[in-house]
Amino acid sequence: MISHYSFGNLIFKNTSYNKDLIIIKTSDGEKILSNWWRKEGHRLQVEDLEEVWKSPVKYLIVGTGASGLMKVDSEVEKKAKELNIKLEAYLTDQAVKRFNELYSSEASVAGAFHLTC
């Protein structure tokens, strides 16, 4: 679970991350993609989530930043729908709460978190 989030910092399982990251949890285990960056910094596009698309997740929780500056491209929504992945986007503090709810419920979930603006 994520135990802490503040601007520019997220703690997952006692490890502190200061760069954007993706956390993927499935029945096969967990994968963390630290230092995740997008093709365009504040625009989330399909190619930015290749590892998520390859994973058997039911949920994709996107943290759009402390102020919500990262925008989710409509093609990401379309791709998630095609793969039957429920996409939810929130400010990062709310995304952390939702991710933790799903993580605790044993759901297969990916979280893509923009940690700053």
Image (cartoon, rainbow, N blue to C red):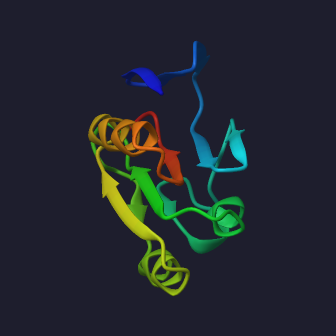
Residue lying at the far top in this picture: please name it: 14
**Residue 30: image x %, image y %?**
68, 41
Q: Position of residue 7 (x, y in %)?
A: 38, 24
Residue 111's x, y, as percent? Answer: 50, 48
- Residue drawn at point x = 53 percent, y = 81 percent: 79
Q: Is residue 50 above or below residue 22?
A: below
Q: Is residue 15 above or below residue 58?
A: above
Compared across the picture, whether 90 is left or right of 109 comes to left
Marks counted in the figure total 0
Indicate the position of residue 18 as horizontal and vertical percent values: 57, 23
Residue 102 falls left or right of residue 52: left
Q: Vertical placement of 11 versus 31: above or below?
A: above
In this view, the residue in front, 41 or 101, is 101
Q: Nearer the viewer, residue 111 or 27?
A: 27
Q: Residue 117 occupies which quadrant of the picture?
A: top left
Along the line of sight, which residue is nearer the eye, 43 or 12?
12
Relative side of 13 to 2, left or right: right
**Residue displayed at 49% across by 82% down:** 75
Q: Residue at x 46, y 34 (%)?
A: 115
Which residue is depicted at the point 53% across and 54% down?
Answer: 108
User: Quarter-wise, where is residue 81 in the image?
Assistant: bottom left
**Depth order, front residue of 98/117:** 98
